């Protein structure tokens, strides 16, 4: 069940755990009708005073163009979307065709991220810090988050519980 309290609680988790602030620019690439698009991207940006850039649907070149043109700093996508970014035909020499230097926070959920994909992303976007976040889809709560320093092979079941946010 979605309540005001658990929406605010989730926004505070994302702000705190991903270290998000008012300078963020997030591309909402996942459907805003899903908890990922609505809470992890859209409402979190409202909660930290950042900017939400909304794609009507995910198309990899449109995503990369918007991310580069608008200096995206944050997004949360499923691993397959990250892989599509790397497979884009224009990326024959990596992501260097796009200026993604502002992209510093890449959260993912919905499925495990293969270690090979994490390594590919690290090579193409060395400044990007990936965060494995997950929880219950029926509620907006992220229950656990693997710290960015955890090895890619860390099982998600051993991830740390999200800390309790503080008010004030």
Image (cartoon, helix red, strand yellow):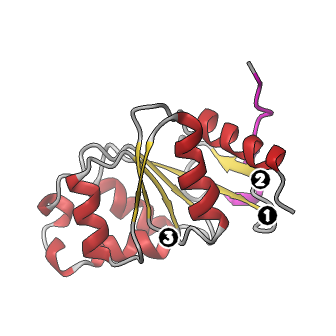
Q: Name the residue located 60 percent from the left edge and 50 percent from the top edge.
A: 43
Between discs 1 and 2, the one toward the N terminus: 1
Is 163 inside the magenta-drawn segment? yes
Residue 79's disc is 3
Residue 24 position by quadrant: top left
Q: Can I make out residue 140 in this image?
A: yes
Q: For residue 16, what is the image quadrant?
A: top right
Sort mark 1 into few (<14), some (14-19) or many (20+) by Cα contacts within 10 Å.
few
Residue at image position (17%, 52%) is 99
Q: Which mark is residue 141?
A: 2
The single residue placed furthest to the right in the displayed view is 1
Q: Which residues are magenta?
A: 155-167
What residue did someone put label 1 on?
Answer: 136
**Residue 132 seen in the figure:** no
Does residue 16 appear to the left or right of 10 in the view shown?
Answer: left
Which marked residue is nearer to the observer: mark 3 or mark 2? 2
Asked whether the beta carbons under mark 1 and mark 2 sit within 8 Å of each other, the answer is yes
Q: Is residue 98 above or below residue 127?
A: below
Left or right: where does residue 140 sit relative to residue 94? right
Q: Secondary structure at mark 2?
A: loop
Calculate the distance from the C-alpha at mark 3 to the C-alpha at mark 1: 17 Å
> Looking at the rendered structure, which numbered label has been put on residue 153?
none
């Amino acid at each position: 069940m979605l309540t005001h309290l658990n929406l605010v609680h989730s926004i505070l988790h994302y702000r705190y755990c991903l270290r998000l602030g008012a300078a963020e620019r997030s591309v909402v690439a996942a459907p805003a009708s899903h908890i990922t698009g609505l809470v992890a991207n859209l409402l979190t940006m409202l909660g930290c005073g950042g900017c939400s850039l909304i794609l009507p649907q995910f198309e990899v070149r449109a995503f990369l163009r918007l991310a580069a043109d608008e200096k995206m700093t944050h997004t949360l996508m499923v691993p397959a979307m990250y892989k599509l970014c790397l497979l884009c035909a224009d990326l024959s020499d990596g992501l260097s065709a796009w200026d993604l230097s502002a992209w510093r926070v890449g959260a993912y959920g919905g499925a495990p991220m293969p270690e090979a994909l994490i390594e590919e992303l690290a090579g193409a976007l060395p400044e990007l810090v990936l965060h494995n976040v997950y929880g219950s889809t029926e509620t907006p709560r992220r229950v656990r988050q693997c710290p960015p320093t955890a090895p890619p092979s860390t099982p998600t079941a051993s991830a740390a519980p999200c800390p309790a946010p503080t008010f004030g």
